[in-house]
Image (cartoon, grey):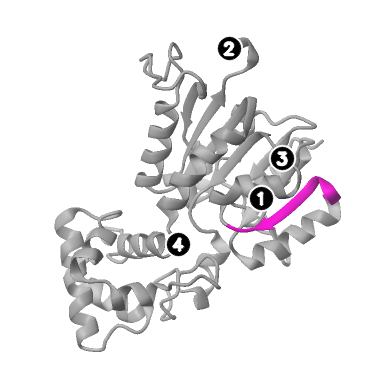
């Protein structure tokens, strides 16, 4: 088995290095013969690393292009890699579908992949004037344009509140309503223009960044999927199993943190030494947070906002 960090797999060869992979492998320590779920396959970097360490991997992703990339990995790893196209919130059904009733680890790398962000036709980025789509699954029922055209001002304000402060979210909502009343809300460029009128540029952060993030998360029900996936992962984990969540957005990180702490067993200690555990029958004996190294942040700007949280489920010795 190789000790190197694998690059993510693209249709034309290796792509980008997955974020916080070294920390994930050191903390979660996947072993030969273990069963792991990679709920966000993307370009396959985490799955490839798990396979290199001898694990069997069930990979999931909503994007049909991910299935094609998984086929490339299967050339090397064969039946040790299974792929199910779908939302990681449905991991229990996916595992049951291939005959797994428990797993040794679950890894969730939240957000979107660089491939999705760099494809103008998907509408995830404000770098191009593109359709207001933003669906991780292109067959999904709701697009970004649908939400911007159909939601009332109060609902739009709640949508933007995920990534913006209350006053700003209300200004963004009003700007969207005014733009659509004028018929000026058809493309990502129109959306950027509407946002710019409500939120002038401040510093290095583009004024559209938070609005695009909040809209994308709403289109794909990303917080709802995470809320369903975390307890599903805990139910699937066998004795000593590990749950690893990599997030790039504060609200996702907050929910992962709270879930791990709420399920920290009575008598177990968190990073602060505080004893927390509302539910002693099922939970984690330890949880920890990891940040990217300075070297990784310099090498890969995407890593700067990344947070990895790992929870270790109780073993038989902890019963």
Q: Position of residue 42 (x, y in %)?
A: 61, 57
Q: Nearer the viewer, mark 4 or mark 2?
A: 2
Q: Mark 2 sits on what residue?
A: 319
Is residue 297 in sight in this rendering? no
First of labels 2, 3 by sequence position:
3
The residues colored magenta run 77-86
Residue 94 has which mark?
A: 1
Query: Disc 4 to disc 1, how far (Cα)?
Result: 19 Å
Crowd tier of the residue under label 3, counting other residues whose Cα lies within 10 Å: few below 14, some 14–19, many 20 or above: many
- Drawn side of residue 273 relative to residue 118, left or right: left
Circle 3 sits on which residue?
50
Find out whether residue 82 is within the magenta segment.
yes
> For the residues marked 2 and 1, what is the alpha-carbon distance in whole angstroms?
29 Å
Q: Earlier in the sequence, mark 4 or mark 2?
A: 4
**Is residue 263 shown above or below 305?**
above
Residue 152 is labelled as none
Look at the picture and state if 242 lies above or below 111. above
Along the viewing direction, whichever of 78 and 19 lies nearer the viewer:
78
Using the image, determine if residue 146 lies above or below residue 29. below
Q: In this figure, which residue is indicated by the disc labeled 4?
A: 220
Q: Which-is-in-front pick, marks 3 and 1?
A: 1
**Is there a contact, CB below 8 Å, between mark 2 and mark 1?**
no
Query: Camera-side residue: 115 or 215?
Result: 215
Residue drawn where x is 55% and y is 73% of the image = 139
Residue 250 sits inside the magenta stretch? no
Q: Residue at position x 63%, y 49% from top? A: 93
């Amino acid at each position: 088995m190789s000790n190197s960090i694998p690059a993510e797999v693209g249709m034309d060869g290796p792509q980008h290095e997955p974020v916080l992979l070294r920390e994930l492998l050191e903390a979660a320590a996947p072993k030969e013969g273990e069963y792991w779920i990679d709920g966000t396959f993307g370009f396959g970097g985490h799955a490839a690393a798990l396979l290199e360490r001898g694990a069997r991997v069930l990979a999931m992703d909503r994007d049909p292009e991910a299935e094609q990339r998984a086929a490339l990995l299967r050339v090397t790893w064969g039946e040790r890699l299974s792929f199910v196209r779908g939302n990681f919130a449905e991991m229990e059904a996916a595992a049951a579908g291939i005959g797994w009733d428990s797993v040794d680890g679950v890894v969730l790398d939240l957000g979107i992949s660089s491939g999705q962000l760099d494809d103008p036709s998907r509408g995830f980025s404000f770098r191009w004037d593109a359709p207001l789509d933003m669906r991780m699954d292109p067959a999904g029922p709701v697009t970004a344009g649908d939400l911007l055209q159909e939601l009332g001002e109060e609902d739009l304000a709640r949508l933007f509140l995920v990534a913006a402060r209350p006053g700003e979210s209300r200004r963004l909502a009003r700007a969207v309503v005014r733009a659509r009343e004028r018929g000026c809300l058809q493309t990502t460029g129109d959306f950027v223009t509407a946002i710019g009128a409500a939120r002038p540029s401040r510093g290095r952060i583009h004024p559209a960044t938070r609005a695009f993030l909040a809209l994308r998360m709403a289109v794909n029900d990303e917080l709802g999927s995470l809320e369903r996936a975390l307890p599903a992962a805990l139910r699937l984990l066998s004795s000593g199993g590990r749950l690893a969540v990599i997030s790039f957005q504060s609200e996702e990180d907050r929910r992962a943190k709270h879930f791990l702490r709420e399920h920290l067993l009575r008598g177990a200690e968190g990073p602060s030494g505080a004893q927390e555990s509302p539910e002693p029958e099922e939970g984690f004996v330890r949880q920890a947070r990891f940040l990217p190294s300075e070297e990784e942040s310099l090498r890969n700007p995407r890593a700067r906002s990344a947070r990895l949280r790992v929870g270790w489920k109780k073993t038989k010795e902890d019963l």
